[in-house]
Image (cartoon, rainbow, N blue to C red):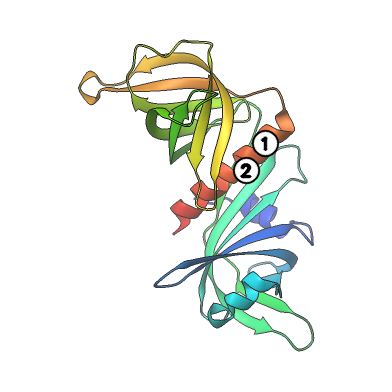
């Protein structure tokens, strides 16, 4: 459940913060990018109404009562906060300005990307050798942090600890490839035939943060639907 602090984080977002929108329609999912104009706490979230080709193509669905999923990364604090919520378009303004007014959320999901805090997720992924595109193991990403995470797949005895691999994660908009070093393997329930593979990421913390933000943004989208 969201706390008062979570909503205060939403209310204090800076103007011009990038916002990811997802319009839910019966036949397709439409993704758009916008900027935060402002927030009227408890009443509305005001976004910039875009005018590029993606917005033009989505114009038929940018209307009152259209269901939307909003995702925001707040990087102003020491620990980046990712927020997501489901709402509806309240009003489309194109006369005095170009604004998209969205109803203030009743429920809110937040994730803080802290140094040593792992975020539990479930996203399809596979493991390949560094110099190959052929999957060695296919499964799902179980949790992730800025330092590393855990990948679950069929148990194998030929994966060498402290070796480097490529972890490929199937995001909705792209296939994300991350260089990882395998650190441990722990077999799960014997009848499942699965194992959990712990891994660490590289030393580029800024790059790691950007990658984790993409992964968690997708995770929040799937759990907000």
Could you say which is closer to the camera, residue 13 or residue 172? 172
- Residue 112 visible in the snapshot: no
x%, y% of residue 192?
24, 25
x%, y% of residue 11?
70, 59
Q: CA distance from mark 1 to mark 2?
A: 6 Å
Residue annotated with mark 1:
209
Mark 1: secondary structure: helix
Report the disc number at residue 213.
2
Q: Extreme left residue here? A: 191
Query: Which quadrant of the view contains residue 44?
Result: bottom right
- Residue 14 visible in the snapshot: yes
- Residue visible at 74% across and 45% down? 75
Quadrant, the C terminus: bottom left
x%, y% of residue 221?
50, 54
Count the marks: how many?
A: 2
Could you say which is closer to the camera, residue 90 or residue 204? 204
Mark 2: secondary structure: helix
Query: Which quadrant of the view contains residue 144?
Result: top right
Residue 55 left/right relative to 88: right
| Callout 1–callout 2 Cβ contact below 8 Å | yes
- Residue visible at 64% across and 49% down? 5
């Amino acid at each position: 459940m969201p706390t008062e602090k979570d909503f205060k984080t939403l209310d204090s977002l800076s103007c011009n913060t990038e916002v990811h929108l997802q319009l839910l329609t019966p036949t397709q999912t439409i993704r758009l990018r916008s900027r935060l104009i402002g927030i009227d706490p408890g009443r509305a979230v005001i976004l910039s109404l875009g005018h590029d080709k993606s917005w033009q193509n989505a114009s038929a669905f940018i209307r009152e009562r259209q269901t939307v999923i909003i995702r925001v990364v707040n990087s102003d604090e020491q620990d980046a906060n990712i927020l997501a919520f489901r709402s509806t378009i309240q009003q489309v303004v194109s006369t005095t300005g170009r604004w998209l007014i969205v109803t203030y959320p009743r429920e809110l999901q937040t994730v803080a990307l802290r140094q040593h805090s792992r975020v539990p997720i479930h996203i399809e992924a596979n493991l390949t050798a560094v110099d190959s595109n052929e999957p060695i193991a296919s499964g799902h990403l179980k949790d992730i942090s800025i330092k590393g995470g855990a990948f679950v797949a069929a148990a194998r005895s030929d994966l060498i600890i402290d070796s480097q691999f490529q972890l490929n994660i199937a995001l909705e908009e792209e296939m994300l490839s991350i260089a990882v070093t395998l650190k441990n393997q722990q077999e799960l329930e014997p009848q499942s035939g699965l194992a959990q593979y712990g891994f660490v990421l590289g030393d580029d913390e800024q790059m790691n943060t950007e990658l984790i933000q993409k992964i968690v943004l997708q995770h929040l989208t799937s759990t907000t639907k």
